[in-house]
Amino acid sequence: MKSRPVLAVLSLFLLASLSARSSPAEAVVQYKDEAAESKAYNTKRVVKTVEGLNFEVEEDRPIVQVGGIYRPVDIDAYVAIKFSELDQRLRQETQRLEDRIDELDERVKQLEARGEAPGQEEAAEPAASK
């Protein structure tokens, strides 16, 4: 029974020490300049001009008009665009790899039909030694 108050005190102490060490401001990484941030996030920021308004945004981030106001597309929509592009690239690469595997499987079948398939010598040797 005595351990519960001790455990509660230790838990409060741990919580207090953790919250004192990390503040929300410390969670955000501060970069020396725009170039360092762009390098860290592997992106390039450009100035886009729409209707005389300048927007400093990622080069592939669209500017949209919402309620008569021009602004960069919301971050969630931008991230969705990026994931969609990534998904498309992964599908293309998967298809390319599947096609290559099919080609290699066909080549192995051709070699097996001619008796030249890789690994046939190793498979034949244990059978011959018995």
Image (cartoon, rainbow, N blue to C red):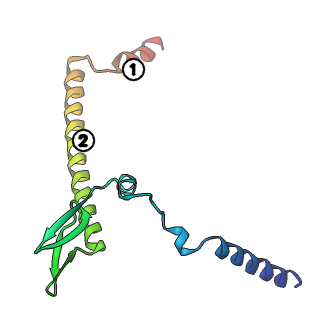
Q: Choose mark 2 or mark 1, whichever is in front.
A: 2
Q: Work out whether residue 122 or residue 42 is closer to the camera in this orientation and state it.
A: 42
Q: Residue furthest right?
A: 2
Q: Quadrant of residue 77?
A: bottom left
Is residue 71 left or right of 41 when viewed as pictured?
A: left
Task: Give the quadrant of residue 8.
Answer: bottom right
Q: State the residue position of label 2.
A: 97
Q: Residue at x 35, y 21 (%)?
A: 119
In this picture, is 117 found above or below 57? Answer: above
Q: Identify whether 86 is placed above or below 123.
A: below
Q: Which residue is mark 1?
A: 123
Task: Please rate how many residues cluster around mark 2, counting C-alpha atoms within 10 Å: few if below 14, some from 14 to 19, many from 20.
Answer: few
Q: CA distance from mark 2 to mark 1?
A: 28 Å
Return the disc, 2 or 1, that comes first in the chain's sequence.
Answer: 2
Question: Measuring 19% from the left and 33% from the top, which residue is drawn there?
Answer: 103
Which corner quadrant holds the N terminus? Answer: bottom right
Residue 11, percent from left and from top: 74, 78
Above or below for 124 versus 38: above
- Return the x and y of residue 102 as percentages of the image width and height: 21, 37
* Type of amino acid under label 2: Leu
The residue under the point 21% across, 63% down is: 47
Which residue ends up furthest to the left in the rendered image? 51
Q: Nearer the viewer, residue 120 or 46?
A: 46
User: Which disc is residue 85 wearing?
Assistant: none
Q: Amino acid at mark 1?
A: Ala
Viewer-proximal residue among 75 and 100: 75
Q: Nearer the viewer, residue 47 or 106?
A: 47
- x, y (%) of residue 121? 36, 15
